[in-house]
Image: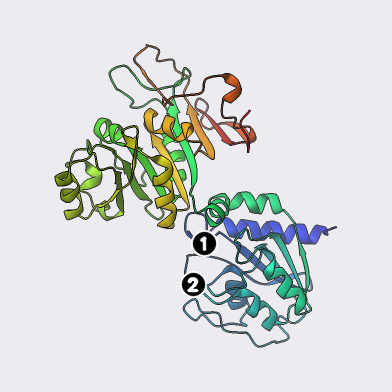
Amino acid sequence: MKFTAQDQCFMQRALVLARHGLGKTSPNPAVGAILVKNGHVIGKGWHKKAGGPHAEIEALIDCGVLKPSRGKNAAPIITRVTRDATFYVTLEPCCTHGRTPPCTDAIIGAGVKRVVVAATDPNPRHCGRGLKLLRRAGIHVESGLFAQEATRLNEPFNKWIVTGMPFVIAKAAMSLDGRIATRTGDSKWITSGVARRYAHKLRAQVDAIMVGARTVIRDNSQLTLRHGVRGRQPLRVVVDARGRAPKSAKLFRDEHRRRTLVLTTALSSAGWRRHLAAHGIEVLVVKQKNGRVDLRTAMRELGRLEVTSVLIEGGGELLGSAFDEGLVDKTVFFYAPAVIGGRKAVPAVIGHGVPAVRNAWRFTRDAHWRLIDGTTAVFEGSREKRRM
């Protein structure tokens, strides 16, 4: 299918709008929409939060065809404003009632002539149905323009809506020899302030940040958005099979403690669990595996809670377990120009590891290196679909 230069221009603008919703719309996808007539934009919008108007409705509101109605989509009256216009949408319009009515009804009611869609909605309830309904209504529908870019934009939603499991990002800041702490446990700071700000921007884009008990004990981590980064505070998840994290830890006592979840097992003390619950901490007991929290079960529970993305920040044992279980979808590794050395220094990834190089997890799809401040390098890569 051939798209014009004008089509490409407007869809790129819609993708820019969609990015405004990153980290804000979960468990919904980030979507942008632009309404065009006679080569001019007459309405634009993006999905701002779950429960609020979808991008298409925001665009219809922007051009005056609809009035804001607390997220409920009223059918617009066909006017000269939208008649024969073209809708550019980064994701297939929804066609079922969810938190809001279907966008397909509003689009049909607006009398648009053409709809150009970037990516098909992977949601089994929608997948392709929205496009069929629009075509059945006599609207000319084309899809696939910048599909890869639009799909990558919503990796967490795409995985969660199909599998019920969150999209998992493994993050670590390490020396050139792969150490995240010295033999004495010192880890501040291996990388630079610029790298830390970059990492906090990552936090602002995910639903949850996950750490192990040892990280809480060693670093007394806050797991909050800082370094000038603003946004929604992600859920803070502590994986602690035996209840080793101290009750006095910062994240159990600060103003965000009600945004904290502890994943533990029956191996932890009932008194410890009761104390945390009494202070507003949600505690979830899951099954154990070899004396540790069964991470696959834990991730499934997070998915049930509509957590679509998890940033695992450490430590090495937790990251290793996530790799061992094949749960990691993407890596973001920061490398500082330093060598720590020592047999007892802490590796970035521990766990059991693989028995042979051919079994290693490969992260080469869409992978790239970036030098972010003249010293610290960042590697970002998505996991290949099969083990090499």
Q: Is residue 152 left or right of residue 350?
A: right
Circle 2 — which element? loop
Where is 170 relative to 158, above or below? Answer: above
Q: Is residue 227 visible?
A: no
Check residue 99 in the rendering and tell me which mark sits there, or answer none.
2
Q: Which residue is mark 1?
A: 28
On the image, the x and y values in percent for residue 262 come to 29, 46
Q: Are marks 2 and 1 in contact (CB under 8 Å)?
A: yes
Q: Is residue 118 visible?
A: yes
Quadrant where the image shows the C terminus = top right
Between 278 and 15, which is closer to the camera in this rendering? 278
Where is 63 relative to 145, above or below? Answer: below
Amino acid at the residue labelled 2: Arg
Query: Within 10 angstroms of label 2, few (less than 14), some, or many (20 or more) residues?
Result: few
Mark count: 2
Q: Quadrant of residue 231?
A: bottom left
On the image, the x and y values in percent for residue 39 come to 78, 69
Where is 72 relative to 290, above or below? Answer: below
- The way the protein has been coloured in the rendering is rainbow
Check residue 347 in the rendering and tell me which mark sits there, or answer none.
none
Query: Within 10 angstroms of label 1, few (less than 14), some, or many (20 or more) residues?
Result: many
Determine the residue located farthest toward the top in the rendered image.
342
The numbered mark, 2 or 1, whose residue comes first in the sequence reads: 1
On the image, the x and y values in percent for residue 194 come to 45, 35
Marks 2/1: CA–CA distance: 10 Å
Between 163 and 363, which is closer to the camera in this rendering? 163
Circle 1 — which element? loop
Q: Is residue 258 left or right of residue 315?
A: left
